[in-house]
């Protein structure tokens, strides 16, 4: 099991957030929070290769290794072609479904080699370094904002990639562009023959769904295998108001409306969100909890909030929302949420991303464990 990197702290359920993120939250009756790693730079994705080994990305272009309770000083890799600016940089990371035998790790980032657009690159983990890079897909539209970049393998062993509209909202409706979409490809970058637009002229065959603004969280619901996503709504500069953040159930070939519909608007042939948030929460991740350690939260959907601060927990019955609540509001901007092999819920702060108010020991990776 992981050992806490610094002293255990506890967390206040739905506490008010002050001018800066709290360093030592107070206790609740349900759980406590432990700091695992501190003083890191904008950790974006977290994966676990074993019960004692965690990798995480830092947006500036580093993959870090936390193993046997210690953060290794030297990164697993420092990408020399990352273009890190504003929201963009090294973001998504996932493991191949057969990682135990092939040791493949996938990274998604905005690249100087792509003129700031996104590429997904596969590496091999040799234990101390990420080696043998192989570009899986490239030239995905991106900008300093709205770069998407959550990557994850589905139950079908296909690689799903979220892409943003790259500050050009009209490309989300264009099937000849990879921007504003959720993509689905094979593990080597080839296109599955059952993708919805494979045989459609002037359409990119990698597209699984379209009409997205900036989705940054995806996971599949246990039991149903429905794909859930979180997505950032309008910021105001598009002339469509603020708020409008979304949780969607994403299905093959469907149009999720951006920029034609947004918030709770409806239109024939377009999908409105399952959940909508105004004022904005800025949902930045998404994961279903499958573990036993926190039995109360079994099969609940969790996602971190950047603007809203904290983590939103959604209880579902299939497609139906049963309840929801926000926890850990006092810790500031929360990016990643991931389940650890120990059954704890791990999450990262993003208070050093240029938009937060860092505490002394930010940014941090923390975990929720039983009280």
Image (spheres, rainbow, N blue to C red):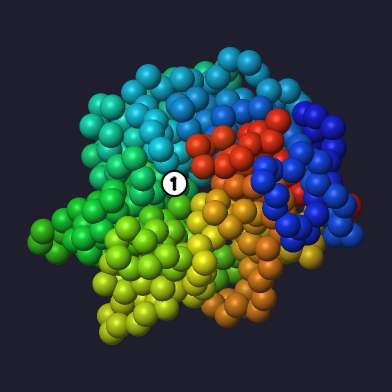
Apparent side of residue 56 relative to residue 365 in the rendered image (left or right): left
Q: Which image quarter: residue 303?
A: bottom right
Image vertical order of residue 97 relative to residue 60, above or below: below
Q: Residues within 10 Å of mark 1 (few under 14, many from 20)?
A: many
Percent position of residue 346, x then y: 68, 45
- Seen in the picture, residue 366 relative to 76 is either above or below; the reply is below
Query: How many numbered tags mark residues here?
Result: 1
Residue 285 location (% of width, % of height): 53, 52
Which residue corresponds to the image point at 50% horizontal and 37% vertical from the top-left? 354
Q: Quadrant of the N terminus?
A: top right
Q: Residue at x 51, y 42 (%)?
A: 355
Outermost residue on the front side: it is: 19
Query: Which residue bears the numbered disc 1?
Result: 151
Left/right placement of residue 189 relative to residue 39 reads left
Frontmost residue, 150 versus 129 = 150
Nearer to us in this view, 131 or 86: 86
Look at the numbered disc 1 and give the secondary structure of its residue. strand
Which residue in the rendered view is the most extreme toward the top? 74
Res 109 quadrant in image: top left
Picture coordinates of residue 314 (x, y %)? 64, 68
The front one of 316 and 48 is 316
Residue 332 appears anywhere in the view:
yes
Q: Is residue 299 visible?
A: no
Task: Write the residue at 38% across / 33% down.
Answer: 85
Where residue 201 appears, x then y in whole percent? Answer: 10, 61
Q: Residue furthest left?
A: 201
Residue at position x 26%, y 72% in the image: 260
């Amino acid at each position: 099991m992981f050992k806490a990197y610094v002293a255990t702290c506890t967390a206040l359920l739905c506490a008010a957030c002050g001018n800066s993120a709290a360093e030592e939250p107070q206790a609740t009756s349900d759980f406590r929070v432990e700091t695992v790693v501190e003083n890191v730079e904008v950790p974006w994705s977290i994966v676990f290769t074993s019960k004692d080994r965690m990798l995480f990305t830092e947006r500036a272009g580093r993959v870090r290794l936390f193993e046997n309770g210690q953060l290794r000083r030297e990164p697993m890799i420092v990408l020399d072609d990352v273009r890190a600016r504003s929201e963009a940089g090294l973001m998504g990371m996932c493991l191949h479904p057969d990682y135990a035998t092939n040791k493949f790790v996938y990274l998604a980032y905005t690249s100087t080699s792509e003129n700031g657009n996104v590429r997904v690159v596969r590496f091999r983990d040799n234990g101390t370094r990420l080696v043998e890079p192989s570009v899986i897909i490239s030239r995905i539209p991106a900008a300093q904002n709205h770069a998407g970049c959550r990557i994850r393998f589905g139950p079908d062993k296909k690689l799903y990639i979220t892409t943003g509209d790259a500050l050009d909202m009209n490309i989300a409706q264009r099937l000849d562009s990879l921007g504003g979409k959720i993509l689905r490809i094979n593990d080597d970058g080839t296109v599955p023959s059952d993708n919805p637009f494979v045989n459609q002229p002037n359409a990119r065959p990698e597209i699984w769904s379209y009409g997205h603004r900036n989705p940054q969280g995806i996971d599949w619901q246990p039991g149903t295998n429905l794909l859930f996503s979180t997505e950032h709504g309008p910021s105001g500069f598009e002339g469509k108001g603020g708020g409008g953040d979304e949780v969607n159930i994403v299905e093959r070939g469907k149009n999720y409306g951006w920029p034609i519909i947004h918030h709770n608007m409806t239109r024939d042939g377009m999908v409105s969100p399952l959940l909508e948030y105004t004022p904005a929460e800025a949902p930045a991740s998404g994961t279903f909890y499958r573990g036993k350690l926190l039995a109360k939260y079994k099969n609940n959907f969790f996602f971190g909030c950047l603007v809203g601060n904290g983590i939103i927990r959604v209880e579902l019955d299939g497609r139906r929302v049963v309840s929801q609540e926000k926890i850990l509001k006092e810790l500031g901007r929360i990016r990643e949420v991931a389940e650890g092999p120990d059954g704890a819920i791990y999450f990262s702060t993003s208070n050093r991303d240029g938009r937060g108010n860092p505490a002394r020991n930010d940014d941090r990776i923390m975990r929720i464990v039983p009280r």
